[in-house]
Image (cartoon, rainbow, N blue to C red):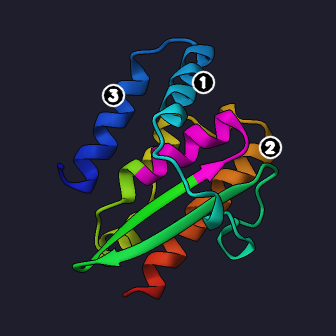
Amino acid sequence: MGSLKEVQAQIVEDFSMFDEWLDKYEYLIELGKNLKPFPEESKTEDRLIKGCQSRVWLDCKMEDGLLWFSADSDAIITRGIISLLVGVYSGRTPKEISEDDFSFIDELGLKENLSPTRANGLASMISTIKRTAEENL
């Protein structure tokens, strides 16, 4: 696994291969399909991210000083978005995550190309990941 900035740069590069947003949505859907299964018994109210139109569950475990996220969503695009975030931030230290500016999301143009409710959900996912990191500092 590369540094956080290297992984983010790779994702920006991957997305830049697609000219059309429809293709980028398809890529997000594929990412969502590759998300590791999330146990049904973990889909609890305390793991639900508030502020998302669709239901998004996020769980985090600390192992050897690193945060490991797992997640799921009941909406396919949202599942892709949380998969992207989990892929970037899992296996990182709380310090790395809390100090990150998440600017690669802006470079992807994700916020501008999502519906307002999905963009709000994305912001909620980001703030939940950041808050989880800060709570584990």
Q: Label 1: state its secondary structure.
A: helix
| Circle on res. 116 | 2
Residue beneath the point at 36% across and 60% down: 90
Q: Which of the two discs, 3 and 1, labels the residue nearer the N terminus?
A: 3
Which residue lies under the disc numbered 3? Answer: 13
Q: Quadrant of residue 38?
A: bottom right
Q: Do labels 3 and 2 touch, CB within 8 Å?
A: no
Amino acid bearing label 2: Pro
Q: Is 85 in the magenta? A: yes
- Within-10-Å neighbours for mark 3: few <14, some 14–19, many 20+: few
Is residue 21 toward the left or the right of residue 7 in the image?
Answer: right
Task: Specify start and end residues of the magenta stretch as a single range.
Answer: 72-86
Q: Which of the two discs, 2 and 1, labels the residue nearer the N terminus?
A: 1
- Within-10-Å neighbours for mark 2: few <14, some 14–19, many 20+: few
Residue 133, image x, y percentages: 43, 77
Amino acid bearing label 1: Tyr
Cα gap from disc 3 to disc 2, whole angstroms: 25 Å
| Circle on res. 25 | 1
Residue beneath the point at 60% across and 24% down: 25
